[in-house]
């Protein structure tokens, strides 16, 4: 006897596990604060590396013009302050964006995991009902045989 509801539920669970096993199910191990800290630190490292690469390439591309314009110490100081100021603005803006993005992403993952766990509980209940029905069926037969 096949239970269509059980088959549909098992298929749905299997597809979810295959599709999201590494990404979402592994995220369930983290608290929100831990997940956000990990993502924010990695984002900070990535934005710093990207900014340094962009500044390095820009300086290499326009080295002649920059060196010609740096005739005084005041201009060099302004140049360094400008680079640091832009870095701070870009980094703070990017970190705010990352916080909002990863917070939303974590909430969505938790929502999907709650649905997944609910489906697992439903499947467990269906299997328990089938097991109880089989026990009742075979238990009645054993009692009838013992009476003979």
Image (spheres, helix red, strand yellow):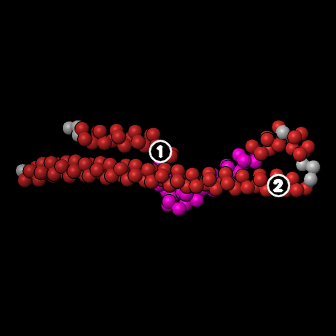
Q: Residues within 10 Å of mark 1 (few under 14, many from 20)?
A: few
Task: Give the residue pinned by disc 1.
Answer: 21
- Rendering coords of residue 35 (x, y %): 54, 57
| Residue depicted at x 55% and y 60% | 34
| Residue depicted at x 55% and y 55% | 99
Q: Are marks 1 and 2 in contact (CB under 8 Å)?
A: no
Q: Is residue 106 left or right of residue 86?
A: left
Residue 95 position (above or below residue 55): below
| Residue depicted at x 12% and y 48% | 141
Instruction: Kindly tell me whether residue 57 is visible in this rendering.
Output: yes
Instruction: Kindly tell me whether residue 131 is visible in this rendering.
Output: no
Label drawn at residue 78: 2
Q: Which residues are magenta?
A: 24-53
Label drawn at residue 111: none
Taking depth in this image into account, of 123 and 60 the one nearest to the observer is 60
Q: Let me know if residue 37 is in the magenta part.
A: yes
Q: Is residue 42 left or right of residue 60?
A: left
- Rendering coords of residue 130 (x, y %): 22, 47
- Rendering coords of residue 101 (x, y %): 52, 50
| Residue depicted at x 28% and y 50% | 122
Taking depth in this image into account, of 90 and 101 the one nearest to the observer is 90
Q: What main secondary structure does the magenta stretch of the protein show?
A: helix
Q: Quadrant of the N terminus?
A: top left
- Rendering coords of residue 15 (x, y %): 40, 39
Element under label 1?
helix
């Amino acid at each position: 006897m096949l239970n269509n509801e059980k088959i549909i539920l098992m298929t749905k669970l299997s597809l979810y596990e295959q599709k999201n096993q590494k990404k979402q199910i592994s995220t369930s191990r983290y608290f929100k604060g831990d997940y956000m800290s990990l993502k924010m630190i990695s984002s900070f490292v990535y934005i710093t590396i990207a900014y340094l690469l962009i500044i390095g390439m820009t300086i290499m591309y326009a080295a002649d013009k920059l060196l010609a314009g740096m005739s005084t110490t005041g201009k060099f100081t302004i140049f360094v302050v400008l680079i640091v100021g832009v870095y701070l603005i870009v980094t703070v803006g990017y970190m705010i964006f990352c916080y909002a993005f990863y917070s939303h992403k974590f909430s969505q993952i938790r929502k999907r995991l709650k649905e997944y766990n609910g489906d697992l509980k439903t499947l467990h209940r269906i299997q328990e009902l089938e097991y109880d029905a089989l026990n009742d069926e075979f238990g009645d037969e054993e009692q009838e045989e013992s009476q003979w």
